Amino acid sequence: MIPAILPTYARANLTFVKGEGSWLVDDQGRRFLDIGGGIAVNALGHAHPELVETLQQQASQLWHTSNLYHIPNQTALADRLVASTFADTMFFTNSGTEAMECAVKMARKYFSHNGQPERYKMIAFEQSFHGRTLGMISAAGAEKLTKGFGPMLEGFTQVPLHDLEALKMAIDDETAAIIIEPVQGEGGIIPVTDQFMRDIRALCEEHGLLLIMDEIQCGVGRTGKLFAHEWSGVTPDIMAVAKGIGGGFPLGVCLATEAAAVGMVAGSHGTTYGGNPLACAVGSKVMDIIANDAFLAQVSEKSGLFRQSLEGLVASHPEVFEEVRGAGLMLGIKCKVTNMDVVHAGYDVQLLTIPGGDNVIRILPPLNISSDDIKEAVARLDQAATAIEATL
């Protein structure tokens, strides 16, 4: 008999009832160190007191009115993001995949508005991930996402990451945009090189293409800058953001330049819940905390400590681990054993990590994780690896 909840997740046999900072407590009272952060969502950890206070204050005043009316919290957050990014305007959503759907629609509308409706195709990259809607699995193209859901939405193709010649060959007169994650998350924590980002920007300029960036997982301070593309000096025309921007409350944003958004007029797109007063109140508080140089400098400092410690861990367990990769506090360890073996061994020592592509475990802790918790996480990973070695 099918369960009441559609069985689309292979859930661990764990049930959490409370969280504080980098820690979760399960229904048996056990404390787990969470360095997966709800898949990069809990950017400020669990039950951050300022986020809790903000949400409680807003919940006592107004939850929802819809986008039929002005929403002051939405305007405040939009103004803050405009001041902090390349963007001139934005559309609020509930999730990352919705933000990417908006980005794709915006890019197609741009060319239609400018008298080139034949330019609708988009180039993405192998091992990418942009969400689970039909449009976004079409964009990513991987069989593990698309199998059984065909036919896919027309107009997307994928090329290998860092293969400039393949990218050039994929561009034709119908190409509208290039879509890229500055750091591939689901694909295995793979940072895009600064040079390749610059090469993409140059191709967009040469061919009149729009550059769409997916910073759903790598944005909002995760790499030590507010957004990961800042490291390369390359700015997008359109960018999707989610996960960390809400600190755990569902919130996504599609940001754009005025030029890229030219076709998006009244009636061209919409959402019932997106940008509601609750979400935007929390999003503004997240920006208050994360979007400043002192906080981002601490992210970089902590990432250095974490990475150095993980490098030592890999060297100590050469039969279990292969390498450390990533940027900031978006780290991955490529495994020699099956990555799920490491994830499960982590459960045994009350440590939470996230599996990813290319046999990687993802480490996506709160950006405000303490140095003591970093040391404890590495110690528990060491215990997990030692337990695995005993079975080899």
Image: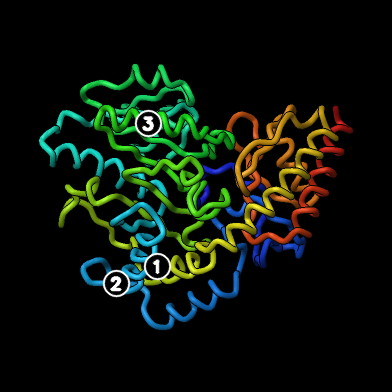
> Would residue 154 be seen by someone viewing this image from the given angle?
no
- Residue assigned mark 1: 280
Q: Would residue 384 be found to the left or right of residue 27 on screen? A: right
- Residue assigned mark 3: 149
Q: Would residue 237 be found to the left or right of residue 371 on screen? A: left
- Residue assigned mark 2: 71
Between disc 3 and disc 2, the foreground one is: 2
Position above or below: 105 against 48: above
Q: Residue 296, located in which quarter of the rendered image? A: bottom right
Q: Are marks 2 and 1 in contact (CB under 8 Å)?
A: yes
Please, what is the three-letter code of the amino acid marked with disc 1?
Cys
Which quarter of the image is occupied by the C terminus? top right
Please, what is the three-letter code of the amino acid marked with disc 2?
Ile
Residue, x 28% and y 61% (percent of image)? 272
Q: Would residue 342 be found to the left or right of residue 143 on screen? A: right
User: Reading the chain from its start, which is encountered first: label 1 or label 3?
Assistant: 3
